[in-house]
Amino acid sequence: MRIDATRLGRLRVLVHGLAVLPLLWLPWGFAAGHFSADPVPELLHYLGIWALRLLLLTLCISPLARRFRLGPLVRLRRAVGLWCFTYASLHLLAWVLLDLQLAWGLIGEEIIKRGFITLGMAAWVVLLLLAITSTQGWQRRLGRRWQRLHNWIYTTVLVVCVHFWWSVKSGWIEPLVYLLAALLLLSLRRDKLTRLRR
């Protein structure tokens, strides 16, 4: 199947539509009682896990495009990546506003003292840089440096998985599943990662 401009446009609309659904579900989820009396930790987990899922999805696109010879599919990475950054930012915002209630001294202390929060902030900064520089204009301005910057996505996905693992108070199966998925997707790029390491 060939992906022409029309089909690509429809796929892009589909990506945006599906990516916004978890946010649209939230009001209904609260009204229907899917969150406990202390919903903030659950909301943090919900937003964070969707950020991680979308991050993994961005790593799926290139292998799928190569496997099925659907080159234009790669153009959807930006949309998925920006939604990943959106959920990661909402995750951070919920932590700052709802969990710590803008107590800036405590926020700084938590970032420094808690390893999983340090990792989360580092990952968010990388995602911020990737989101800002995701346009073709920035790609032209940065030249070869653009690809070097965006290669940080491979380290970031592992950082996010470790952030998730360290953040859970009990249970390790779910974090392990996401970590194994990340390692599998990175293994599909082992030749590229070997060149980058050299």
Image (cartoon, rainbow, N blue to C red):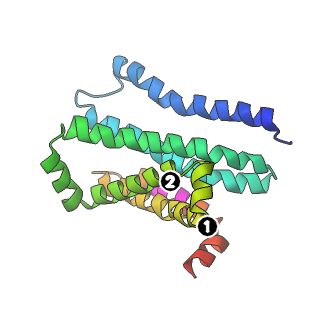
Q: Is residue 60 above or below residue 24?
A: below
- Secondary structure state at the residue bearing disc 1: helix
Looking at the rendering, in which quadrant would you find the N terminus?
A: top right
Looking at the rendering, in which quadrant would you find the C terminus?
A: bottom right
Q: Which residue is painted at 30% across and 53% down in the image? A: 167
> 26 or 131: which is nearer to us?
131
Picture quadrant where residue 30 is located: top left
197 in the magenta segment: no
Q: Which residue is painted at 76% across and 47% down in the image? A: 72
Q: Which residue is painted at 27% across and 41% down in the image? A: 95
Residues under numbered marks 2 and 1 in contact, where contact means CB atoms less than 8 Å apart: no
Residue 111 in picture, x, y percent from top left: 23, 56
Left or right, 152 with reference to 187: left
Name the N-terminal-most of marks 2 and 1. Answer: 2
Residue under pointer 1: 144
Name the amino acid type tagged 1. Arg
Q: Which residues are magenta?
A: 176-182
Residue 116 visible at all: yes
Residue 161 in picture, x, y percent from top left: 43, 57
Residue under pointer 2: 130
Main secondary structure type of the part rendered in magenta:
helix
- Secondary structure state at the residue bearing disc 2: helix
Left or right, 130 with reference to 5: left
> 183 or 150: which is nearer to us?
150
